[in-house]
Image (cartoon, rainbow, N blue to C red):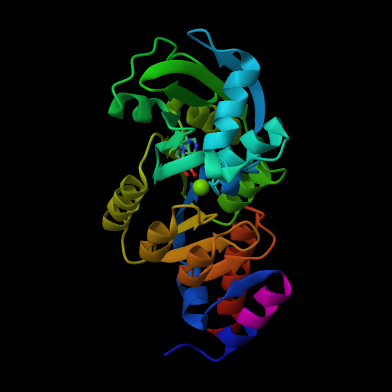
Amino acid sequence: SIPLGYFGGVGGAAKRGILVKGATFLDTLTDVKTVVFDKTGTLTKGVFQVTKIAPYNGFSEPELLTLAAKIEANSNHPVAQSIRKAYGKPLDSTEVTDYEEILGHGIRARVNNKVVIAGNDRLLHRENIPHDNCNVAGTVVHLAVDNCYAGYLLIADELKEDASDAIIKLRRAGVERTMMLTGDNQTVAQNIANQLGLDGYQAELLPEDKVDAVEKLLRQSGKKSKVAFIGDGINDAPVIAIADVGMAMGGLGSDAAIETADIVLMTDAPSKVAEAIQIARKTRSIVI
Ligand code: ADP
Ligand code: MG
């Protein structure tokens, strides 16, 4: 049974914007040795700027951006929001038909009856569209129209202000391993891992690959060595569900993730993970 004092800890955490959905999770938190972060929207702001428009095969820059904005008109993905913002004009969503959002890849749809795709390298491979610019450093959205490569948009996200602090504080709180899982490409992931001094990362993951990665960590961990996962909830509710402690960002996060999570961080600050662990430890030292 859970010592009564833990309920006081739950209240104290809530006052600091950390909603713990049961005293038992506070107990589990004290044994967390591995913390796994999602990237986009969790360690980074999830607000991308379009930094380059690179048209191919006769497209112009405005044409490429317009095409991208049109196909992204109905997507909730952070990538889509940034492209619409760069376009800056109202969009007529009736121009888009046969809309299909492919998890971890991008979008396939008809725009004014032409088949358009927008997404990453993996999507281009899947659709058999050859392209020769694989060495772009950054998050890339490729576009193709009726099987012809049309070019790419380079988009850049920023680390959250407290991301670096979050990792330092976790180490101070006795966490032995910090990791990042992302659907974004290797270059982007490696850059962030280096900047933050993470112990490891895995890139180019599909949502189900993230589940596999966390399951593997869970198998490797002992009874007193728990695994926490923290995500913004875009595509990562399943991972939040299987971690020993699943955490969701409450502001940006999707409803599904907030419902699934054991702990919700109201301020979307990754440094709150270490704070939660410290509150849990302090509570245990009082109750036991
Ligand atoms: P993350 O793991 O970084 O949170 P996701 O799993 O949501 O990322 O997406 C992985 C990748 O799939 C993105 O980095 C992007 O390349 C591509 N992608 C997903 N949705 C879209 C979209 N609507 N438009 C373009 N690309 C997309
Ligand atoms: Mg995400």
Q: How many numbered markers are drawn? A: 0
Q: Nearer the viewer, residue 87 or 8?
A: 87
Quadrant for the N terminus in the image: bottom left
* Residue 116 image offset from top left, x and y in percent: 43, 29
- The quadrant where residue 5 appears: bottom right
Residue 11 within the segment the image draws in magenta: yes
Q: Is residue 146 left or right of residue 154?
A: left
**Rendering coords of residue 99 (x, y %):** 42, 44
> In the displayed structure, would residue 147 be above or below residue 9?
above
Percent position (x, y) of residue 113? 43, 32
The residue shown at (28%, 51%) is 216
Q: Residue at (69%, 31%) from the top-left corner?
A: 86
Indicate whether 283 appears above or below 42: below
Q: Which residues are magenta?
A: 10-16
User: Which of 73/158 is in front?
Assistant: 73
Instruction: Report x, y in % for residue 166.
Output: 63, 49
Membership of 241 in magenta stretch: no
Q: Is residue 127 visible?
A: yes
Question: In the picture shown, does residue 94 fall above or below 70?
Answer: below
Q: Is residue 221 left or right of residue 190?
A: left
Residue 227 makes an appearance in the image: no
Left or right: 33 with respect to 55? left
For the point 60% across and 78% down, the residue is: 283
Q: Between residues 88 and 176, which one lies in front from this camera angle?
A: 88
| Main secondary structure found in the magenta portion | helix
